Image (cartoon, rainbow, N blue to C red):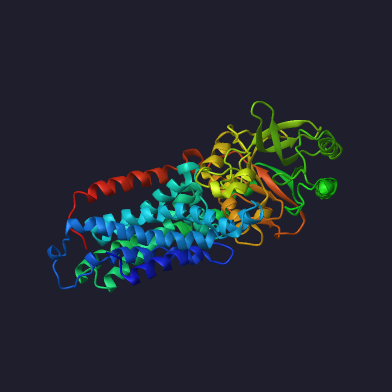
Amino acid sequence: MSAPVHSFALATASGVLLTLSFPKFGHPAFAWIALAPLLVALLLEPESRTPKSRTAESRIPNPKSLPHSLMRAFALGLTTGIVFFTGTLYWITRTISVYGGLQVWVAVVVNAALIAYLSLFPAIFAVVMRRLVFSLGARALMAAPLVWVTTELGSTHLFTGFPWVLLGYSQVTMLPIAQLACIFGVYGVSALVASVSAAASLIVSSRVGQVGPTEAGHYVREVAAVATAVLLVAVWGSLRAAKAELTRAGEPIQVGLIQGNVDQGEKWNADRASAILQRYLGMTRQAVGEGAELVLWPESSTPFFFEEDRDGAERVRTLARQARVPILLGSDQLERGRPEKYYNSAFLVRADGTTAGVYRKMHLVPLGEYVPLKRLFYFAAPLVEAAGDFSPGVEAVLLPVDGHLISTAICYEVVYPDLVRRFVTGGSELLTTITNDAWFGRTSAPYQHFAQASMRAIENGRYLVRSANTGISGIVDPYGRILAQSDIFQPAAIVGRARFLTGLTFYASHGDIFAYASVVATVMALLVSRRQKRHV
């Protein structure tokens, strides 16, 4: 038994609205109502459509219909997920086709597999919500924020996770709302945004005959509670951002961000290596001349292995000594042994030219630095060969700068909230992230990536400085304000002020307790629903 066509139209609408919630084509406002169409579709399942005049007892569903209802809910949620992730991850096809050596049709299949996997989480969300509504009635829609956060947490951690475009990221530019992240992290923002969709779907339920007038009146308090919560967060967030105490705390430092804008096709061209290195050295001198006290180069910025090319490394060390400025740079690293291991690493060169420390990337990019389920993707042999060489680092190494500790997240590591938090609780006073977003081209991905990185600054109460090969490079303060930002695919040497900070936000101290509490609440709600038979 298939769901009505209009239900799939509503599920598709949710996917479209979710897509439009993120840069570069969307606007944060869409996020607040994005889940409402899907929730209404779940409420409008055939067993739920009854005349207003019927009594509550006559609306008791046949328990035998539940399995079919849940199957339809799964299909609806999957539809939402496929539309959403196709609209936000479309750029992966180009990336693995151009740089992974795959034919376009194979790249489409590989990207489709990732989209299908991520779409399972909205599908699970829909199944859980349908189960709750089936047994507990329309009021169970108010559990949607907790259930949604539970599935987001799953997408973050299961099978190494791929937590791209979590709902809360849509609000990173809405500073009053985004301040909630310093308490409950990005998941807390996701829940707040989802709560508006839940309230909106309740309102719709009273307009389409799903509840009687008396029952509809009972939902006023739920809707009022959501409106009050959003208002309180907005007012508190506005005051917090306006007060901006952290922008006057700690020791200031001038940071230079080098955006070399090196074409990915030229990066490992031996004939171009000297010119590429000279470009970075020259731009570094420019940044130091403008007052930079710490210089960041992007991920894999050196056209050689830093520890393996003595001449190239010495030119970098000589510049650090001459300028008396430490340089943080990205370069691949070889660990000799049987077998040999390769790491995507960040090296900190002290002002005296010596190496202060090395951080090895811990979260590798699926389909970029390794291929999950290689045997399954046997038909993508060029991609497996190109992406299968890197090993993950095992330690969240902090790097010393002038008596302070800093951390660096390499590339998409910055979208893992708990990893960055671990840096901060370990003593990091300044968040840095280095990346090479040249793979993304002129798509939405660089803008999505920068927005997600910015959320880490708010969560942890730290300045975040970001150097990207082709952009976006920039400086973000602890409240999410962008103090400096480059354009994409333009060379740039940005110099701006950040601060070393030591205090901990509630989120930094306690982590994702809200997200895990949402998991517990979701499980409890499901247990309660098994004991209930009435639905609205």
For image coordinates 29% across by 62% down, the residue present is 221
Residue at 28% over, 49% down: 525
| Observer-nearest of 354 and 223 | 354
In this rendered view, identify the residue nearer to me: 489 or 308.
308
Query: On the picture, is 29 further left or further right than 52?
Result: right
Percent x, y for residue 101? 65, 52
- Residue shown at 45% from the left, 50% from the top: 187
Against 277, residue 132 (above or below) is below
Q: Considering only vertical position in the picture, is 45 above or below 500?
A: below
Q: Position of residue 334 (x, y in %)?
A: 70, 33
Q: Which of the 4 image quadrants contains residue 82? A: bottom left
Q: On the picture, is 361 further left or further right than 317?
A: left
Looking at this view, name the residue that lies furthest to the top: 337
Where, quadrant-wise, is the N terminus in this rendering? Answer: bottom left
**For the C terminus, which image quadrant?**
bottom left
In this rendering, does residue 199 appear at all?
yes
User: Does residue 295 appear to the left or right of 414 in the view shown?
Assistant: right
Q: Where is residue 130 in the image (x, y as percent from the top left)?
A: 29, 58
Residue 237 seen from this side? no
Task: Name the spot of residue 407 as percent of width and height, x first.
Answer: 64, 39
Residue 55 lies in what quarter of the image? bottom left
**Figure disc tally:** 0
Residue positioned most to the front: 379
